[in-house]
Amino acid sequence: MARILVTGGAGFLGSHLCERLLEADHDVLCVDNYFTGSKRNVEHLLQNPRFEVLRHDVTFPLYVEVDQIYNLACPASPVHYQFDPVQTTKTSVHGAINMLGLAKRVKARILQASTSEVYGDPEVHPQPEGYWGKVNPIGIRSCYDEGKRCAETLFFDYWRQHQLEIKVMRIFNTYGPRMHPSDGRVVSNFVVQALKGEPITIYGDGSQTRSFCYVDDLIEGMIRLMNTPADFTGPVNIGNPGEFTMLQLAERVIALTGSKSELVFHPLPQDDPKQRRPDISLAREVLDWQPTIALEQGLQKTIDYFAKVVKA
Ligand code: NAD
Ligand code: UDP
Ligand code: UDP
């Protein structure tokens, strides 16, 4: 049993992580400024005496005593991270410095929720961890992409310079229950639109691809990574290698919901990556991990969730 800090713990992934850590009888401190997360995501955990929640912004120092830190604080949806881009970079960079400083002081092991966005609009497909990426440093996605890249740099420098036990996880698009209905990411948008019978918004011609991982698989990979031997740092890709165009995703959502929604086409946002699929050989080898939930299965669980929270 350990004392574990989860930053961004009231968000989509963070709340699932807190739940899993509590199930394993750990003490969990959830830290969140509720920018995109919500108290409702962790409400069901509040009666557990091992669970604590603290409203705090990770761009400010934090002094607590913990054994492990999962650093997830950062808005993940383009709509939200572009709302206040300066704050997004601060969250990734100052947030990483503060959490690394904390880890250094208390000698905690620390995991960074990095992203497939570090590969940008990739020229190598699928993406292995050794690929350095193709990222625009001055575009509208840069606050997120470059912030996360800089956080990775800080993690590796604290590892080299201060011998911290670091773990860097590159998360590919993940979906599931507890995404916010107005999160703005593609799976929640399509499911909510289909359930409401509203037009399904395809950006561009819908031929761009993504690989979608169900949240339970992702959290399993994250916990396995945290518990690897001290000399293993990553970075490790965690995602589902199944690759779909946005048109294929829309078709599946329509079929599973039985929706009468039609497709409408909107302009493709600037710097929107054309393709993305993880090479998960390293995760298979080191973590003995691979996704177990196929897109249809995960979408059905997500649809069942949204059907309860979204009123037509
Ligand atoms: P989310 O927006 O639901 O969760 C992020 C959480 O961080 C929210 O609860 C938010 O309120 C909190 N937060 C934001 N800024 C903060 C700050 N300055 N201080 C404290 N808390 C702050 O998104 P998510 O999908 O759960 O993503 C969690 C992490 O995983 C993020 O770091 C994200 O970049 C990373 N990630 C997610 C995906 C994905 O597909 N879900 C993919 C790649 C990386
Ligand atoms: N920090 C923190 N909690 C701690 C220790 C440090 O939030 O328990 C922050 C603090 O703001 C500091 C940053 O982490 O500036 C980096 O810490 P480090 O020890 O690496 O550097 P320094 O204190 O020299 O700036
Ligand atoms: N997208 C879309 N319709 C939407 C929301 C997103 O077609 O309503 C597209 C978006 O342009 C991108 C893909 O779906 O090509 C994934 O977008 P998301 O914001 O979920 O994640 P990211 O672009 O960060 O991978």
Image: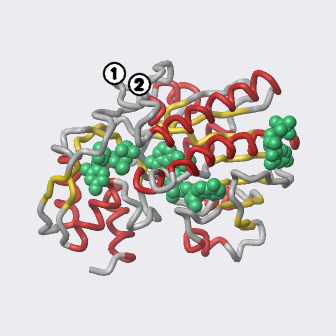
Q: In which quarter of the image is ligand 2?
A: top right
Outermost residue, bottom direction?
Answer: 311
Which quadrant is the C terminus positioned in?
bottom left
Neighbours of disc 2 within 10 Å: few (<14), some (14-19), many (20+): some
Question: From the viewer's perspective, is 289 left or right of 201?
Answer: right
The x and y percentages for residue 237 are 50, 32
The x and y percentages for residue 199 are 17, 65
197 relative to 150, above or below: below
Q: How far apart are marks 2 and 1 (CA)?
A: 7 Å
Instruction: Quadrant for residue 134, please give it.
Output: top left
Tag 1: amino acid: Glu
Going 68% across and 41% down the picture, which residue do you hit? 96
Q: Does the residue labelled 2 lie within 8 Å of ligand 3?
A: no
Which residue is label 1 attached to? 123
Q: Is residue 220 visible in this depiction of the protein?
A: yes
Which residue is label 2 attached to? 134
Question: From the viewer's perspective, is 38 left or right of 210?
Answer: right
Instruction: Quadrant for residue 264, please give it.
Output: bottom left
Question: From the viewer's perspective, is 26 left or right of 175?
Answer: right
Q: How is the image coloured?
A: secondary structure
Q: 285 or 139, which is in the foreground?
A: 139
Of label 2 and label 1, which has the lower sequence position? 1
Going 25% across and 71% down the picture, which residue do you hit? 195
Neighbours of disc 1 within 10 Å: few (<14), some (14-19), many (20+): some
Q: Is residue 8 visible in this depiction of the protein?
A: no
Going 12% across and 68% down the picture, which residue do you hit? 260
